[in-house]
Amino acid sequence: MIVRSLNEITGTERETSAETWTSRRLLLKSDGMGFSLHDTILYAGTTTEMEYQNHLEAVYCIEGKGRLKDLVNDKEYVIQAGTMYALSGNERHILIAEQQLRMVCVFNPPIVGSETHDKNGVYPLVE
């Protein structure tokens, strides 16, 4: 059994930050669950373009408000507490945080922990 609190991973190697977000990685590949689980903050007033070519991702918003632009299907969605979206087709997208967004994210395959977006908004597939 794995029991872990957000407080115990904050400020450790399980917390990764970039210009527009901070991700606290509760479960990683090394935990052997077959997926990774993240508590992610996107800072208010930021825009983040992403495309997970190597991973499927599901995201559940638990705080804040923003917009999700699906660049593949030319659609836009309101994201707010209680909204879930899944990138079932590895869609290139833009997340606009009108307010600070707090998201619970699941990645398959799981990430190792050190990944951050490359210049194209992609997480590399780390074996």
Image (cartoon, rainbow, N blue to C red):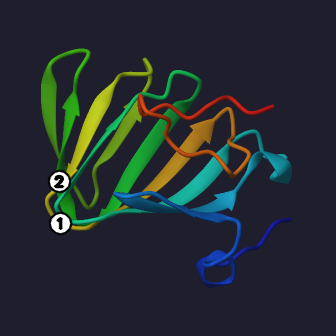
Of 111 and 82, nearer the camera is 111
Is the residue under label 2 in contact with that under label 1 (CB below 8 Å)?
yes
Dot label at residue 51: none
In the depicted structure, whether residue 61 falls above or below residue 127: below
In the depicted structure, whether residue 4 falls above or below residue 108: below
Image spot of residue 54 (x, y percent):
59, 23
In the depicted structure, whether residue 22 falls above or below residue 36: below
Figure quadrant of residue 111: top right
Q: Residue at x 68, y 51 (%)?
A: 114
Q: Residue at x 70, y 56 (%)?
A: 27
In-image side of 99 versus 38 (left or right): left
Return the residue found at the far front. Answer: 119
Image spot of residue 103 (x, y percent):
40, 58
> Closer to the N terminus: mark 1 or mark 2?
2
Image spot of residue 112 (x, y percent):
74, 45
In-image side of 61 versus 117 (left or right): left
Label 1, residues with CA under 10 Å away: few <14, some 14-19, many ≥20: some
Residue position for label 1: 99
In the depicted structure, whether residue 74 falls above or below residue 63: above
Instruction: Describe the element under mark 2 as helix, strand or loop.
Output: strand
Q: Amino acid at mark 2?
A: Gly
In-image side of 124 versus 60 (left or right): right
Residue position for label 2: 66
**Quadrant housing the C terminus:** top right
Q: Amino acid at mark 1?
A: Gln
